[in-house]
Image (cartoon, helix red, strand yellow):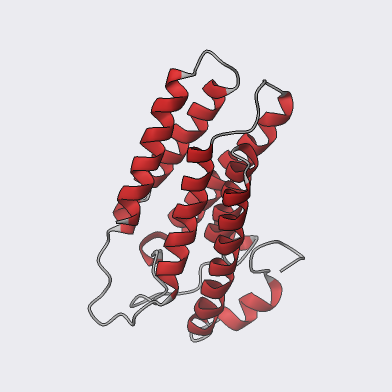
């Protein structure tokens, strides 16, 4: 249901931006909206992948999915407050693009062990290469960076509030994941030398 709501909001916003494309900076907003849509579709196969039959319930998933959807919907439907082009607008767009790229790199690096659910797969081991060399949860780092750029471009109080909920949901998920991952051989020593989300910060 949330997936459909997100797609509908992005499509509605894209049509509105297309109608206003002659007025700056709506062409850039359209590009960001379409890029977000492409990102959602790129992860669709993971979103709808069935969990193993013996997987425990993940109480964090509804909050995480709702906060992410709310952040995007509040941004695109309220529109951007910017009424003229400025080179400063490139900064949130670059942050968004960099965050998406970093997240997709993390997903690719983790391979079949990656899931939108908090669970451990059979045969899972600690991955320490690629973006996992920098932080322990690079997919979440990318998610937060991408949405920070997205919210900065489509800036309004609703998207800011939803983003705060997204941060809280991710912190909650990380706590649950850490308790699960400590059972993997080598994870404790890896965690001692690698930050969770931001190097040398947390």
**Where is residue 161 drawn, in percent x and y?**
60, 57
Q: Is residue 167 above or below residue 77?
A: below
Quadrant location, the C terminus: bottom right
Which quarter of the picture shows residue 57?
bottom left
Quadrant location, the N terminus: bottom left
Residue 129 visible in the displayed image: no
Determine the residue located farthest toward the bottom in the rendered image.
183
Residue 196 visible in the displayed image: yes
Q: Residue at x 70, y 73 (%)?
A: 193
Q: Indicate left or right for 84 with 58 as reference.
A: right
* Residue in front for this viewpoint, 31 or 82: 82
Q: Residue at x 27, y 61 (%)?
A: 49
Q: Is residue 137 above or below residue 70?
A: below
Determine the residue located farthest toward the right in the rendered image.
200
Q: Is residue 75 above or below residue 63?
A: above
Q: Is residue 61 above or below residue 56?
A: above
Which quarter of the picture shows residue 92?
top right
* Residue in front for this viewpoint, 10 or 57: 10
**Where is residue 150 drawn, in percent x and y?**
58, 42
**Where is residue 37 drawn, in percent x and y?**
40, 39
């Amino acid at each position: 249901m949330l997936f459909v709501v997100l797609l509908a909001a992005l499509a509605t916003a894209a049509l509105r931006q297309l109608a206003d494309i002659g007025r700056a900076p709506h062409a850039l907003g359209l590009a960001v909206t379409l890029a977000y849509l492409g990102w959602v579709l790129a992860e669709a196969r993971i979103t709808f992948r069935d969990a193993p039959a013996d997987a425990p319930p993940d109480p964090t998933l509804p909050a995480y999915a709702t906060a992410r959807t709310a952040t995007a919907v509040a941004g695109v439907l309220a529109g951007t407050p910017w009424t003229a082009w400025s080179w400063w607008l490139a900064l949130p767009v670059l942050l968004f693009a960099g965050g998406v790229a970093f997240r997709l790199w993390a997903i690719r690096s983790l391979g079949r062990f990656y899931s939108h659910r908090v669970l451990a797969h059979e045969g899972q081991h600690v991955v320490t290469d690629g973006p996992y060399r920098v932080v322990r949860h690079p997919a979440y780092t990318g998610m937060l960076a991408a949405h920070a750029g997205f919210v900065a471009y489509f800036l309004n109080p609703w998207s800011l509030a939803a983003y705060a909920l997204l941060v809280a949901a991710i912190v909650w998920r990380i706590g649950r994941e850490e308790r699960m991952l400590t059972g993997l051989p080598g994870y404790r020593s890896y965690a001692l030398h690698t930050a969770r989300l931001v190097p040398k910060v947390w």
